[in-house]
Structures are given as C-alpha cells and as structure tokens.
Image (spheres, helix red, strand yellow):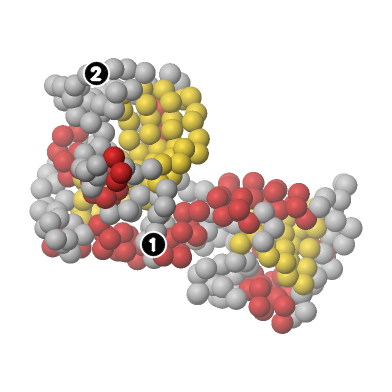
C-alpha cells in the first residue's frame, strides 16, 4: 500500500468519524487513522456507540505491532480519563506510537489532557490539522460541551409562500414523501425532538424516527420532549405511546420565564444534564419564535414545497422582530433538492453566547 500524507489521513479520519453520527451521544464522534513508520495506513477506527471502544483503540487493534514508531491521526484529542473505557492517551503510549496528530482539542474538562500526557511521555503532538472540517463534523457535541446546553436545530416545512397549513388547518402533506424520509433521517442523528403542546394538541405527532414505507422504528430513538407550560398534554397523545422515551416539560418542573411559560434556557440546561447534545425543534410556530427570539437556534433546516396557499398559518410567529433593522440575518450554507422540494440549511448570523 502506498504511503499517505498526514493531511490525507486526517481527511479519512473525518470521514470515518461521520459514521458514528446518531449513535455515540452523549459522547463525540471520533475517527482515527494509524500510519506506520513508512506512512502506510495500518489501522482505522471510529467511535461507533457510547460505551464501545474508542476510535484509537479500534485502529490500534488493527495495526498491532506496526503501530510502534508510527503516527496516529485523530479528529479529537485522545481522552485522558477512565470512564466506561480506559484512557486512549495511555493506550497510544503503550503501543509505542511516536507521533499523534490532532484536529481539535477536547473541550470536556473530564476527558481532556491527552495531549499533555502524550507530550510528557515523549510523544510528538501536533494540533489543528483540518480543524475546521473536524469541527463541522462534530459541531453538536463540541458546541454543547463548550457552553453547557444542546446544539439546537429548528426544522420546519412550508409552502413557497411560507404557509405551514391551509386556511382550514389541513397540513398533511405539505412536503413530499422524499422530504419526510429526509426528516426521519435527521431525527436519527439527534438526541431529542422538541415540540410545543400546541402542535401536540393540533397534529398529535409521534415524533419518532421510523421507516415511512413500513412504519418500523429506528433502533435508536430520540427523547421526545413536549414543551407544555401548564401540563395540557392528553394522556392518550401519541407521544405517550411508549415507542420512545417522552418528557412532558412543564413550567412547574423546569421553571418559568417572565411570561409564565417554560424557561427555555433552563429547559436546554436540563436536557444537557440528561445527556442531550443535539436537539431537533420541530413544532410549532410559537415555540420556534420563542427560541429564535432568545437566540437559542444554531441551525435552521427548512423544507420548502412548490405550493402556494395564500392563506393559513405561517411556519413562524413572533420572534422578537418589530422592524426590518431587527430581522434575524441568516447565512445559507446549503440548498438541496429533495424530491420536488427544496431543503434549505441556514445559520443565524452574529450569535453571541
């Protein structure tokens, strides 16, 4: 096998890390590539599930004795603590690796310190190779670790004129089956799906991740969270069907803001405490407006159908904007056609934490 550069190895490690999206939380996604003394790939690994072997351990097992004197290329600083698995920093040292190249330092104070441990053992350490790409692939976990609440994605579906339902309230289906399949794939990458009690009362959604063709549930289900200030969620609502864990978050339990409704910042802090690193906000327009007004949205994913209604509910209500100067500016990062619909991904600009 031909030798590869460290840059090429890191690109491969980032690709490997992505395979763990949706299954590693509350841990990060991590990829690792091991090069021998000649620069040939002798081991690859990624963190596949929480509690399972870390990327470095998988790669070291593949490499065996060929890891000695070689280079480990890893997307996140090797952990330096003993949890459900042992410290990867110690495993790399024991394997005789002479150099470790890291894309992003670990912001988790419980697990960080691997780079210092490696250096103290005489291992060369380099930081920052393809850091931006590695950050993007692990953005939810890194963001939540740095600030203490989950990375929040707001997903909505609307017609081209911004309507989420017709004037008579009907909304099934605004978007195509292809778009709905895409949404279920998105649900499979997050730890929690949030909806307001208004959406539960109006639409009675399941909020599960499933195969639309046969209705089977995905093996891993996100926590279903109903933001319900006064506890109006019916006992027979489909979110209580036992298909996935459900938390009805009330103001009495979470705490209330000045408006008497659930304190959203306190809600996110509690979700983080429960191990939620990425949350998908799905409904409805009032809750979405409140999240946007509070600056709590990290990414927006809009599914726009080639339909016009001219009347009916809109996808977003009051977001704290009263004049054009206060408009929430967005950076569009992707536009993809999904069936007949458009999926538009955007990031709110000038966010401060």
Q: Quadrant of residue 206?
A: top left
In the image, 310 versus 88, the foreground residue is 310
**How many callouts does the rendering have?**
2
Residue at 58% across, 47% down: 18
- Residue 166 on image: x %, y %: 20, 22
Task: State which tag comes first along the sequence, 2 or 1.
Answer: 2
The residue drawn where x is 28% and y is 54% is: 294
Give the residue at x 29% y 27%.
162
Quadrant where the image shows the C terminus? bottom left
Residue for point 21% across, 39% down: 317
Q: Residue beneath label 2, please?
A: 309
Q: Which residue is mark 1?
A: 353
Residue 143, image x, y percentages: 46, 59
Q: Secondary structure at mark 1?
A: loop
Is residue 15 toward the left or the right of residue 202 in the image? right
Q: Is residue 162 above or below residue 48?
A: above
* Residue 189 falls in image quadrant: top left
């Amino acid at each position: 096998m031909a030798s590869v550069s460290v840059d090429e190895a890191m690109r491969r490690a980032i690709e490997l890390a992505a395979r763990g999206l949706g299954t590693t939380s509350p841990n990060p996604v991590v990829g690792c590539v091991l090069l021998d003394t000649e620069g040939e790939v002798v081991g690859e690994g990624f963190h596949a599930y929480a509690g399972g072997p870390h990327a470095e351990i998988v790669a070291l097992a593949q490499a065996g004795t060929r890891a000695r004197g070689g280079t480990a290329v890893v997307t996140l600083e090797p952990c330096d603590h003993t949890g459900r698995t042992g410290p990867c920093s110690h495993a790399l040292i024991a394997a005789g690796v002479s150099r470790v190249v890291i894309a992003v330092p670990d912001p988790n104070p419980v697990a960080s310190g691997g780079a210092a441990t490696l250096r103290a053992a005489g291992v060369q350490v380099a930081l920052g190779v393809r850091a931006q790409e590695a950050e993007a692939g692990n953005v939810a976990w890194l963001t939540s670790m740095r600030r203490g609440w989950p990375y929040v994605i707001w997903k909505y579906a609307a017609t081209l004129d911004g309507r989420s339902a017709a004037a008579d309230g009907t909304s099934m289906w605004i978007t195509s089956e292809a778009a709905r399949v895409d949404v279920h794939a998105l649900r499979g990458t997050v730890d929690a799906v949030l909806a307001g009690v208004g959406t539960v009362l109006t639409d009675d959604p399941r909020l599960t991740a499933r195969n639309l063709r046969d209705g089977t549930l995905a093996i891993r289900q996100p926590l279903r969270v109903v933001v319900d200030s006064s506890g109006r969620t019916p006992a027979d609502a489909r979110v209580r069907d036992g298909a996935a864990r459900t938390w009805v978050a009330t103001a009495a339990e979470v705490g209330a803001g000045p408006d008497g409704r659930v304190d959203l910042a306190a809600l996110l802090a509690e979700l983080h405490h429960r191990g939620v690193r990425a949350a998908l906000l799905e409904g409805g327009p009032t809750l979405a407006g409140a999240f946007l007004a509070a600056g709590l949205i990290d990414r927006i994913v809009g599914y726009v159908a080639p339909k016009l209604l001219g009347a009916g509910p809109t996808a977003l209500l009051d977001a704290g904007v009263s004049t054009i100067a206060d408009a929430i500016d967005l950076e569009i990062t992707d536009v993809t056609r999904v069936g007949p619909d458009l999926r538009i991904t955007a990031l709110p600009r000038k966010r401060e934490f």
